[in-house]
Image (cartoon, helix red, strand yellow):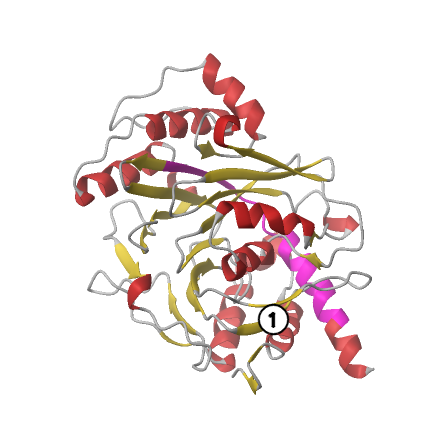
């Protein structure tokens, strides 16, 4: 009974914790020939974060509130994710099959009503997809298997996001939850391969009325969601592949155009066919690169991580073990920042609940350290 109470307490805290993540962002897809790049800005208060190597073969359970049946699964694919609030709570990432899932703020989000499907919170939904799916079609099919959990009533106005999903074949879709149902734009229903912070259909209508966009190298003066979407959609439509270096420059230049000054803390470009992630945490910082083809996704080893602000001297991250003490140190340091506490209150109890739930994840019959 004590174990169950602690699990329920952790779920409540983690649900409240997820609801604190309100942020505006912009993303777009570039495709030409066999080149596919997914570009994304994180516009947010803090630049701290972990780049986490999530193993395959890991038995997991979702963090949900009392009264909801948690989803349970075993990860089929390894992935690399960008997590600010700790393991299993990614803002986005890519798996070894070349699937990318990223989220953007959407105030109009309307969560499904409680039904027989097991539930999952809005950030762990991303990890679930990266763990289980290799294509956009597989992601969309999971709506029959899991239900996106609404946040607590006290935080209902805060936890609102939608997703842009793409795979290595070039299939791409927006996933929104409007009026309690999953709303998808894909194929012919996805005329513009971008997403910002308005419902997709409204953003497309705006972009069609405002086709003129700044030229290459010009900064977007209007930083509104609609204007950023229109600019990103134009960059996507105008992409013509060149060398790999030219492609990446085009992608990062596009992210710079829709950046929101110092509020843009992470710029990420995923190379889907190449299974590589390029990212910067400042406009003029050197690119950091993670090559998924060189990573060990075995769940028999301790989960690996690197701090996103580490600034290694080479263009590749050096990963190390994300043990519970290391994880605790990171979370404790981040959650006790004066500005984090000012914006969100004391989140330290969440840390203990999160660590407790993660101890229940196992690899086969062996407990994961």
Find residue 259 and report its horizontal and vertical position in percent.
Answer: 38, 37
Residue at 44% of width from left, 15% of height from top? 210
299 w.r.t. 315: above or below: below
- Is 17 part of what is drawn in magenta? yes
Residue at 22% of width from left, 35% of height from top? 241
Relative side of 222 to 89, left or right:
left
Residue at 38% of width from left, 48% of height from top? 168
Relative side of 286 to 64, left or right:
left
Find residue 58 and report its horizontal and vertical position in percent.
Answer: 53, 73
Quarter of the image where one finds residue 184: top right
Q: Nearer the viewer, residue 183 or 199?
A: 183
- Is 265 part of what is drawn in magenta? no
Find residue 220 and report its horizontal and vertical position in percent.
Answer: 36, 26
Q: Is residue 136 visible?
A: yes
Which residue matches tag 1?
Answer: 60
Q: Nearer the viewer, residue 171 or 119?
A: 171
SS category of the residue bearing label 1: strand
Tell me which segment is drawn in magenta.
8-29
């Amino acid at each position: 009974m004590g174990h169950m109470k602690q699990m329920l307490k952790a779920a409540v805290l983690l649900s409240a914790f997820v609801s604190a993540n309100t942020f505006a962002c912009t993303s777009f897809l570039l495709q030409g020939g066999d080149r596919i790049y997914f570009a994304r800005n994180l516009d947010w208060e803090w630049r701290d974060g972990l780049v986490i190597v999530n193993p395959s073969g890991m038995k997991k359970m979702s963090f949900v509130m009392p009264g909801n049946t948690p989803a349970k699964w075993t990860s089929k694919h390894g992935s690399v994710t960008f997590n600010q609030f700790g393991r299993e709570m990614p803002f986005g990432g890519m798996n070894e099959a070349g699937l990318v899932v990223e989220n953007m703020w959407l105030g109009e989000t309307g969560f499904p009503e409680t039904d027989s499907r097991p539930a999952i919170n809005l950030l762990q939904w991303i990890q679930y997809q990266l763990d289980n799916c290799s294509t956009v079609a597989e992601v969309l099919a999971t709506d029959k298997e899991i239900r996106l959990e609404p946040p607590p009533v006290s935080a209902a106005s805060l936890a609102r996001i939608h997703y842009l999903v793409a795979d290595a074949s070039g299939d791409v879709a927006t996933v929104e939850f409007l009026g309690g149902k999953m709303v998808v734009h894909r194929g012919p229903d996805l005329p513009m391969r971008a997403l910002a912070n308005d419902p997709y259909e409204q953003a497309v209508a705006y972009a069609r009325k405002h086709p003129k966009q700044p030229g290459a190298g010009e900064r977007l003066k209007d930083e509104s969601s609609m204007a950023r979407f229109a600019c990103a959609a134009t960059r996507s439509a105008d992409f013509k592949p060149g060398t790999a270096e030219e492609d990446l420059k085009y992608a990062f230049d596009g992210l710079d155009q829709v950046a929101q000054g110092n509020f843009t803390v992470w710029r990420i470009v995923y190379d889907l066919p190449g299974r590589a992630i390029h990212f910067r945490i400042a406009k003029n910082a050197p690119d950091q690169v993670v090559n998924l083809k060189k990573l060990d996704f075995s769940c028999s080893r301790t989960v690996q991580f690197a701090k996103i602000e580490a600034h290694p001297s080479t263009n590749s991250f050096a990963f190390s073990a994300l043990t519970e003490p290391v994880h605790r140190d990171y979370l404790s340091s981040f959650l006790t920042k004066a500005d984090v506490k000012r914006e969100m209150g004391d989140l330290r109890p969440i840390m203990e609940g999160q660590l407790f739930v993660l101890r229940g994840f196992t690899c086969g019959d062996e407990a994961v350290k």
